[in-house]
Amino acid sequence: MHPRQARVTEAEVARLEAEMDRMNEELEPLRSFVLPGGNRLNAELHICRTVCRRAERACVALARAEPAPPEAVRYLNRLGDALFVWSRWASHAAGAPETLWDPNQPASGQVGG
């Protein structure tokens, strides 16, 4: 690794955590799983979260095979959580209702059949 190459450190992890805490203060507590949707930005942030989780799994696999900075895995984990909070905040800021998962509702949204 080049000595001047940018690195993820615990400071970046802490910054994400502080940002999530700040944004969560404006949000209602979770009562259910939140599904993607409500507005475009919310959905796109959920897609980013999916890609981030995939990168996190790849980094964990890499760390099992060879030395990898543990801060990278922690950062990707916190980034995935931050993208979730940002998606909720985007809906809140836009005044869009969150789509909550209802375990008793069929996937089609239609009752009966």
Image (cartoon, helix red, strand yellow):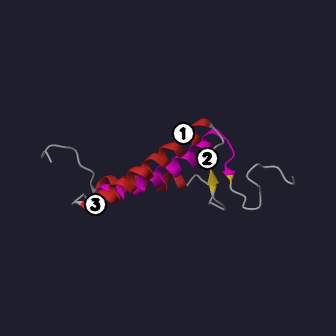
Which of marks 2 and 3 precedes in the sequence?
Answer: 2
Measured Cα–Cα span from mark 3 to mark 2: 30 Å
- Kindly state the secondary structure of the residue where label 3 is placed: helix
Residue 111, image x, y percentages? 85, 53
Q: Which residue is mark 3?
A: 63
Q: Is residue 97 magenta?
A: yes
Query: Residue at 45% across / 46% down in the picture?
Result: 51
Number of numbered markers: 3
> Which label's residue is closer to the chain start, 1 or 2?
2
Identify the residue under disc 1.
44
Q: Main secondary structure of the magenta part?
A: helix
Which label number is shown at residue 36? Answer: 2
Lateral position of residue 57 relative to residue 107, left or right = left
Q: Residue at x 52, y 51 (%)?
A: 84
- Please tell me in which quadrant of the rendered image residue 73 appears: bottom left
Return the residue found at the far left. 3
**Part of the protein shown in magenta:** 72-99
